[in-house]
Amino acid sequence: MPSHAQLAAKLLRDAATFFRTISEQNPPLKEQMDENASVFDQVADLVEQDPNGVIEENQ
């Protein structure tokens, strides 16, 4: 049974795949959709590497 963090990472990666699919099918949106996919992959990495991690805010 997956942990909450594992499930969250999978959902984030699935969303990244969705954005890449939209990117391939709609060239005018490619740049934005690729950027969205990258962000979702980065957050999935964070969740997998440190599920309880905290993002420090720059002030």
Image: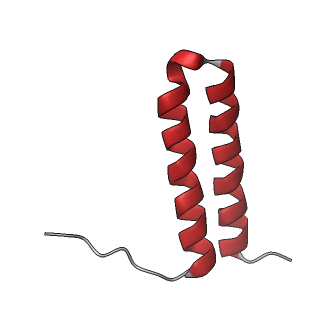
Tell me the residue at 67%/26% (across/down): 24
User: Number of numbered discs present?
Assistant: 0
Is residue 23 shown above or below 34?
above
- How does the figure colour the protein chain or chains? secondary structure
The residue lying toward the viewer, choosing from 54 and 19, is 19
Res 9 → quadrant: bottom right
The residue lying toward the viewer, choosing from 18 and 3, is 18
Tell me the residue at 51%/83% (across/down): 52
Is residue 36 shown above or below 24?
below
Residue 59 is left or right of residue 28, and the answer is: left
* Quarter that holds the N terminus: bottom right
Tell me the residue at 49%/41% (across/down): 35
Is residue 9 shown above or below 39?
below
- Extreme-left residue of the structure: 59
In the rendered image, residue 29, in percent from the top left (x then y), is placed at 52, 22
In the rendered image, residue 2, in percent from the top left (x then y), is placed at 80, 75
* Quarter that holds the C terminus: bottom left
In the rendered image, residue 44, in percent from the top left (x then y), is placed at 60, 64
- Extreme-right residue of the structure: 1
Residue 53 is left or right of residue 1, and the answer is: left
Tell me the residue at 70%/31% (across/down): 21
In the rendered image, residue 57, in percent from the top left (x then y), is placed at 25, 71
